[in-house]
Image (cartoon, grey):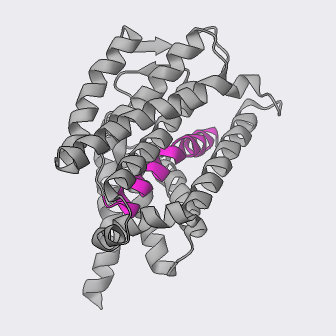
Amino acid sequence: MSFYLTALLQGLCFSGIALGIYISMKIFNIPDITTDGSYTLGGVVTAILLTRHVSGYLILPAVFVAGGVAGAITGLIHTKLKMNALLAGILVMYGLYSINLTLMGRSNLPLVGTSSIFSSWAWLNDFSQNTGVILLFFVIIMTFLIGYLLKTDFGLAMRATGNSESMIRALGVNTERMKIIGLALANGLTAISGYLITQFQGFADISMGIGIVIVGLGSVIIAETLINWLHITSVWVSLILVLTGAVIFQLVLALTLSIGVDANLLKLVTAVFVLLIVSLPRLNLIKE
């Protein structure tokens, strides 16, 4: 049971990645690979500041800003230099590897003798339950803020930029600025996931972000499948389904390990699972 509880908590930690991928891919239609680097950057900044005994309250905005700067750089390269968004993200991610390694000074930075938000906010006696409550608090706040933003005029302009860039540009909206802000927001949320998972697992590692984009992608694909099947149009419900997708994704991986599948095959199983989720709606269309 504790095995699945850990998977559930990890799914909540990855909610920021899921929301970030949702913004970049579903709202702006931009495949952003900066995710791998900004997630690690969030973890690295968190670990460095925690070892210097900086308060978690101050670390959180610093992490968000760091991830936002990484996303904004990708946006600037894409919009100002007219470079393909995928390539721009790859270049920034590649550069962030060296930046993260330089900041840490080594490949792994353990949080020995430091206090995390999960230990300093002891609302419940049971550590796992206390961690779950804190993570739920973070998830609710993030979902509320993003949902509120997407319902404002600025959020509607963001959504219109992804749906019909030429139309919204004709209305006087600076679509390049919208893309830069959108990518900054997406990577800021991704960095928050790095902030949470680093404190949850007790260390930051230079390789922690390798392939992490598949977690967000899988979460969004699961959510998109549910949205299409249920014909959801509400922004709030869509965001909740994205978060649900992040939890489902981790629970499926936990189930895979619990039935005895070799851990070396976990990434292969992950790829196959995402492929199946992508294929299901198309198989239904073929059948019809």
Residue 23 lies, with reference to residue 63, above or below; the image says below
Is residue 31 among what the camera can see? Answer: yes
Task: Write the residue at 83% across / 30% down.
Answer: 125
- Verify whether residue 16 appears in magenta: yes
Prevalent SS, magenta region: helix
Q: Position of residue 188 (x, y in %)?
A: 47, 39
Front in this rendered view, residue 134 or 52: 52
Q: Position of residue 148 (x, y in %)?
A: 62, 60
Is residue 241 among what the camera can see? Answer: no
Q: Position of residue 24 (x, y in %)?
A: 38, 54
Q: Residue furthest front?
A: 172
Task: Write the residue at 49% across / 81% down.
Answer: 231
State the count of labels.
Answer: 0
Task: Say whether residue 125 is left or right of residue 216.
Answer: right
Task: Say whether residue 128 is left or right of residue 149.
Answer: right
Q: Residue furthest bottom?
A: 288
Residue 10 lies, with reference to residue 204, above or below; the image says below
Task: Write the residue at 73% across / 30% down.
Answer: 127
Front in this rendered view, residue 283 or 225: 225
Front in this rendered view, residue 236 or 125: 236
Residue 238 lies, with reference to residue 175, above or below; the image says below
Q: Position of residue 287 (x, y in %)?
A: 28, 88
Give the quadrant of residue 224: bottom left
The magenta span reads 2-29
Front in this rendered view, residue 186 or 127: 186
Task: Say whether residue 104 is left or right of residue 94.
Answer: right
In the rendered view of the protein, which quadrant contains the N terminus?
top right
- Verify whether residue 108 appears in magenta: no
In the rendered view of the protein, which quadrant contains the C terminus?
bottom left
